[in-house]
Image: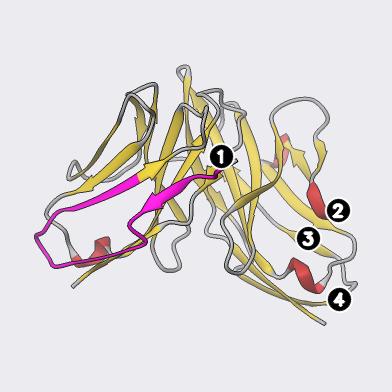
Amino acid sequence: AQSVSQHNHHVILSEAASLELGCNYSYGGTVNLFWYVQYPGQHLQLLLKYFSGDPLVKGIKGFEAEFIKSKFSFNLRKPSVQWSDTAEYFCAVNALKGGGFKTIFGAGTRLFVKA
Amino acid sequence: EAGVTQSPTHLIKTRGQQATLRCSPISGHTSVYWYQQALGLGLQFLLWYDEGEERNRGNFPPRFSGRQFPNYSSELNVNALELEDSALYLCASSLDRAHYNEQFFGPGTRLTVL
């Protein structure tokens, strides 16, 4: 069965620290990859996505992610976090099959940035 | 532009009852997705509707069902409620059924089964 693993459930960083959140998926077919973020009291919203082309994608608020097909990974990075990045981050995969797809989310990573 | 809306915000039911949750997608969007977010489990894919048809469903029993109306709004029905159905139910919409579209999420309906 397809699955998405986010290795860290909770991350605590100080402001200006670098961030890397891991995401691995298990599916041998074609995938589209997404990172969503949920800020406190807000809805889930898209940070960035990959579906073709350059495997290094840039999103909003200085976030980027790199698709490494050989490692089935799509890690999220930010060189210097801010207090306002405190949120829950979800990796998601659209696993394509037979003209359709299924969206699979990881369990999420709660990031707390200390001011 | 109005976002995805869901009603009710909270719903309290007892075991064995039925629950109906509603979702209105962003205007112009034809695809609607339903997810269950139980505590600590992330989002579990439930159902996907597009153009009035069920396109895919997750690994949930048949007592989870739904439909999409001609105006693209959607309903999720949960029959014979069990305690473990208590969760936040999220609805999302996307422009169409293209696999690369982002999904726009609503605020969710908190279902509590007593």
Q: Amino acid at mark 3?
A: Glu
Q: Residue B27, relative to residue A111: is it above or below?
A: above
Spatial CA span between label 2 and label 1: 21 Å
The image quarter in which residue A38 lies: bottom right
The residue labelled by disc 4 is A15
Spatial CA span between label 2 and label 3: 13 Å
Q: Quadrant of the N terminus of chain A?
A: top left
What numbered label is drawn on residue A44?
A: none
Q: Position of residue B95 (x, y in %)?
A: 55, 28
- Residues in magenta? B2-22
Report helix, strand or loop for mark 4: loop
Q: Nearer the viewer, mark 3 or mark 4?
A: 4
Report helix, strand or loop for mark 2: helix
Report helix, strand or loop for mark 1: loop
Q: Position of residue B32 (x, y in %)?
A: 43, 35
Q: Residue at x 38, y 44 (%)?
A: B23
Q: Amino acid at mark 2?
A: Gly
Q: Can residue A64 be seen in this snapshot?
A: no
The residue labelled by disc 1 is B103
* Marks 2 and 1 close (CB-CB < 8 Å): no
Spatial CA span between label 3 and label 4: 14 Å
Q: Residues within 10 Å of mark 4 (few under 14, many from 20)?
A: some
Spatial CA span between label 4 and label 2: 14 Å
* Tag 3 and tag 4 share a subunit: yes
Front residue of A31/B75: it is B75
The residue labelled by disc 3 is A20
Q: Amino acid at mark 4?
A: Glu
Q: Position of residue A48 (x, y in %)?
A: 72, 43
> Along the horizontal axis of the image, is A91 left or right of A76?
left
The residue labelled by disc 2 is A62
Q: Position of residue A58 (x, y in %)?
A: 83, 43
